[in-house]
């Protein structure tokens, strides 16, 4: 089943075509990669799908519904979670509290119920603590849960961004450059964590320019200047010399 698809998705910024009639189909349960060099339109795609930007033309369909005009909070409520390239964390909060506070979309946590500390609110808080523990365990963050977010190594901060996105129990999780700025050990840790998401039945869209991500992808779409230049399996893209050499400079991705 196709969980997310776009039809001729187009975004212009003045004279610049940042997204050029992109058609993409993401299978439910897959880890799908959207890769391309800097400036290719990856973050633009992200923002179009999540309702942060409105497309100039074209359509976004999620689970059979046209969500082209949906706002970010509506998209989140429909089960699309995301991380941000600049990974906004609460540096002075612990790892645990960063994930716990990311549950705010939960309908149980309305302001009046917090104020009056109702039974419903207390039950909700217990659920949030349990779910937070589970997410941290699942992403191997339990042993750093009491650390302040700002004291974590960069790679762990990125995974903490994923942990926060999981709080809304997404059906589709979109990750913007999850390997950006990581050292090899952090990359290995993150690749392991991302592939575990699929084992939980979460569909994952990974936007990345680091080709190392290919090892965990089921399917990959390559874009350049906002347009699709390749769509297929990681094995196929590895054999496509034009894609590798023209758009990735070859030797960056040994
Ligand atoms: N808000 C904006 N206004 C004008 N141009 C933009 C804006 N956002 C992105 N762009 C341009 O659109 C192109 C695609 O950018 P982006 O989606 O950020 O690429 P990527 O994430 O692949 O590096 C770039 O040329 C960028 O300069
Ligand atoms: Mg980007």
Image: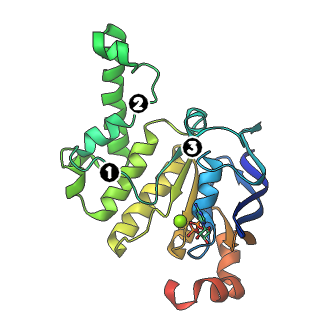
Name the spot of residue 69 as percent of width and height, x first. 70, 40
Q: Nearer the viewer, mark 3 or mark 2?
A: 2
Q: Nearer the viewer, mark 2 or mark 1?
A: 2
Quarter occupied by residue 32: bottom right
145 relative position to 99: left or right: left
Identify the residue shown where x is 42% and y is 19%: 108
Q: What secondary structure is found at the residue carrying circle 3?
A: loop
Give the residue pinned by disc 1. 140
Give the residue at the far front of this rendering: 14
Q: How is the image coloured?
A: rainbow
Q: What secondary structure is found at the residue carrying circle 2?
A: loop
Identify the residue shown where x is 52% and y is 91%: 251
Which quadrant does the N terminus fall into? top right
Name the spot of residue 164 as percent of width and height, x first. 39, 44
Mark 1 nearby-residue class (10 Å; few <14, some 14–19, many ≥20): some
Work out how far the residue at label 2 is from the one at label 1, CA to CA, in angstroms.
Answer: 23 Å
Circle nearer the N terminus (3, 2): 2
Mark 2 nearby-residue class (10 Å; few <14, some 14–19, many ≥20): some
Q: What secondary structure is found at the residue carrying circle 1?
A: loop
Identify the residue shown where x is 44% and y is 67%: 179
Give the residue pinned by disc 3. 201
Give the residue pinned by disc 2. 104
Name the spot of residue 244 as percent of width and height, x first. 64, 84
Name above or below for residue 90 compared with residue 209.
above
Work out how far the residue at label 1 is from the one at label 3, CA to CA, in angstroms.
Answer: 18 Å
Identify the residue shown where x is 25% and y is 63%: 153
């Amino acid at each position: 089943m196709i969980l997310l698809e776009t039809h001729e998705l187009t975004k212009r910024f003045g004279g610049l075509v940042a997204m050029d009639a992109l058609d993409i189909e993401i299978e439910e349960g897959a880890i799908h990669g959207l890769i391309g060099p800097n400036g290719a339109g990856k973050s633009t795609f992200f923002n179009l799908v999540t309702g942060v930007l409105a497309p100039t033309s074209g359509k976004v369909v999620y689970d059979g519904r046209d969500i082209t005009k949906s706002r970010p909070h509506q998209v989140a409520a429909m089960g699309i979670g995301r991380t941000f390239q600049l990974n906004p964390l609460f540096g002075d909060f612990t790892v645990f509290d960063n994930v716990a506070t990311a549950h705010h979309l939960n309908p149980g946590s309305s302001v009046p119920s917090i104020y009056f500390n109702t039974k419903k609110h207390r039950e909700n808080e217990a659920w949030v603590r349990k779910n937070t523990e589970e997410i941290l365990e699942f992403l191997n963050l339990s042993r750093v849960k009491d650390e302040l977010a700002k004291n974590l190594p960069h790679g762990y901060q990125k995974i903490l961004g994923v942990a926060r996105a999981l709080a809304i129990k997404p059906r589709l999780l979109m990750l913007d450059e999850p390997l950006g700025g990581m050292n090899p050990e952090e990359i290995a840790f993150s690749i392991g964590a991302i592939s575990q998401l699929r084992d939980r039945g979460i569909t994952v869209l990974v936007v990345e320019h680091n080709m190392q991500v290919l090892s965990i992808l089921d399917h990959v779409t390559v874009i350049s200047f906002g347009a699709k230049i390749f769509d297929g399996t990681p094995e196929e893209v590895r054999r496509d010399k034009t894609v590798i050499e023209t758009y990735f400079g070859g030797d960056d991705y040994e």
